[in-house]
Every structure is written in structure tokens, then in C-alpha cells.
Image (spheres, rainbow, N blue to C red):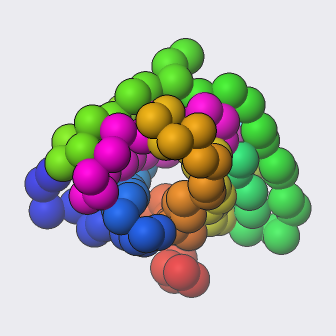
Amino acid sequence: MDNTPCFEATTDDVRVVVQTFWLDDQSEPDEHRYVWAYRIRIENHGTEQIQLLRRSWRIVDGKGRIDRVEGDGVVGEQPLIDAAASFEYMSGAALETPTGFMGGMYHMIRPASRQHFDVSIPVFSLDSPHHPTVLH
């Protein structure tokens, strides 16, 4: 990943690293539409293969409104991540306010043992150049 600020969290042997990117070309501040992309890398530092089954997000806008999003996998996949390997994907978020934050959980399984476990997605800020101060 490049020099963009990173947010990270480690749960057991799984590290999640997030970078956010302001998308000026997709945002329309006059229409109260602010858009970001984010890149997430899930690193398996354990000794067993893991699989991401589901995700749960908590998205909070600059007015404190909370949106909860749950679903299977990420970007249409339920990736298997081998020991000492990683999986990376890009996605995005749109808010009606120029700032906010989001975070959540990945619901995983270790296929060999059928053990289910949750991995924290670090809370990360969504700050646009249209907000006078960075709050997060």
C-alpha cells in the first residue's frame, strides 16, 4: 500500500488494514453526495486457511445517523485466505455529509476445524475536503 493513511486492527492472527480515498469526481457536494473508495487487505498470519463468510458494517455520517449493512462475503466473493497469505479488495461508501466513519466485523471460519470466529474491521474516518476540520 502507498503513503495514504492506514487504519489497522489485529484479531488473533488476522490483520485488517484499511486505506480510504476521497473521490472528488463522483462526489456532488451541492447535492449532499460525498463519495469515498476504500482498499482493505486481510492478512492471515496464522497457520490454517481461513474463509470470509459474511460482513457487518456500522456506518455513521457527520450528523450521527447510523446505517448498518450486513451481507455475504465481500465484493461478491467469500475468499479463502491461505496461511501466511492475504486478500485485498476495493469498495466504496457514499454519505450525505462531508465526514463520517465506519467499521465493523468479518465473520470467518477455519475450514479445517469448522471453527467460526469474528475479525474486527478497524474504525476508519471518511473526511472530505468540503469539511473545514477533520474530526476523526
Q: Is residue 120 left or right of residue 61?
A: left
Closer to us: 119 or 110: 110
Relative depth, front residue between 133 and 114:
114
Between residue 3 and residue 113, name the one nearer to us: 113
Instruction: Give the answer, above or below, for where 9 lies relative to 96.
Output: below
Residue in the picture at 63% in, 48% down: 116
Look at the image and tell me whether residue 27 can be seen: no
Q: Residue furthest top?
A: 76
Percent x, y for residue 101? 62, 65
Identity of the residue furthest to the left in this view:
2
Q: How many marks?
A: 0
Residue 27 in percent (x, y) is at 54, 37
| The C terminus lies in quadrant | bottom right
Q: Which residues are magenta?
A: 33-55
Q: Is residue 44 magenta?
A: yes
Residue in view at x 42 percent, y 40 percent: 50
Picture residue at 60% right of the left edge, 32% below the top = 53
Of residues 22 and 71, the one drawn nearer to the viewer in this rendering: 71
* Residue located at (82% from left, 49% from top): 68
Magenta span: predominant SS is: strand
Where residue 85 sits: x, y (%)?
A: 20, 42
Question: Is residue 133 at all visible to an observer of this figure?
Answer: yes
Residue located farthest toward the right when viewing the structure as drawn? 65
Q: Quadrant of residue 135?
A: bottom right
Residue 38 included in the magenta stretch of the image: yes
From what the image shows, is residue 113 above or below residue 46?
above
| Whole-percent x, y for residue 73 in the image | 59, 28
